[in-house]
Amino acid sequence: MAVKQQFTSFEDAIANSDLPVLVDFYATWCGPCKMMADILERVNVQLNGQIRIIKIDTDRYPQIASDHRIQALPTLVVFKDGAPVDRIEGVLQADRLVDRLQQFL
């Protein structure tokens, strides 16, 4: 189950994580983003605490989306040690996403 958390800043959440961070850039009006939300729940269960998942609503935080050059939704960006290491645009099924994330765990 996803847990809502507040961070001082997006950068702090990424840089200070002891786990790889998967950031889901989404919008509430985006149909594929809603599909991705269910997929991320399954991925979170499968990876059982090996990765942190953060969701960023691009309508509420447009500057963060701009800073990370988000041009399509949904876009997933994997951060490790505070740096982006992978980027996925569009919907990816849970098993394929888990396979892709394995290299960063």
Image: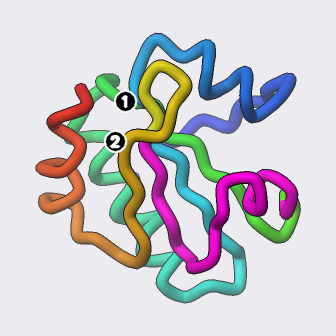
- Mark 2 vs 1, N-terminal side: 2
Q: Answer whether residue 59 is visible to the viewer in this image.
A: yes
Mark 2 and mark 1 in contact? Answer it, CB < 8 Å.
yes
Q: Is residue 18 left or right of residue 4?
A: left
- In the image, residue 26 lies at what x, y percent? 63, 68
22 over 42 or under it: above or below = above
54 over 94 or under it: above or below = above
Q: Disc 1 residue type? A: Ile
- In the image, residue 33 lies at what x, y percent? 53, 75
* Near-viewer residue (84 or 19): 84
Placement of the C terminus among the 4 image quadrants: top left
Name the residue rendered at 66%, 54% in the picture: 68
Q: Is residue 11 left or right of residue 22?
A: right
In magenta segment, residue 72? yes
The residue range painted magenta reads 62-78
- In the image, residue 80 lies at what x, y percent? 42, 27
Q: Which mark is residue 44?
A: 2
Name the residue rendered at 34%, 41% in the picture: 44
- In the image, residue 64 lies at what x, y percent? 78, 52
Q: Is residue 53 left or right of residue 91?
A: right
Q: Which mark is residue 51?
A: 1
Local packing at callout 1 (Cα closer than 10 Å; few below 14, some 14-19, many 20+) is many
* Near-viewer residue (89 or 83): 83
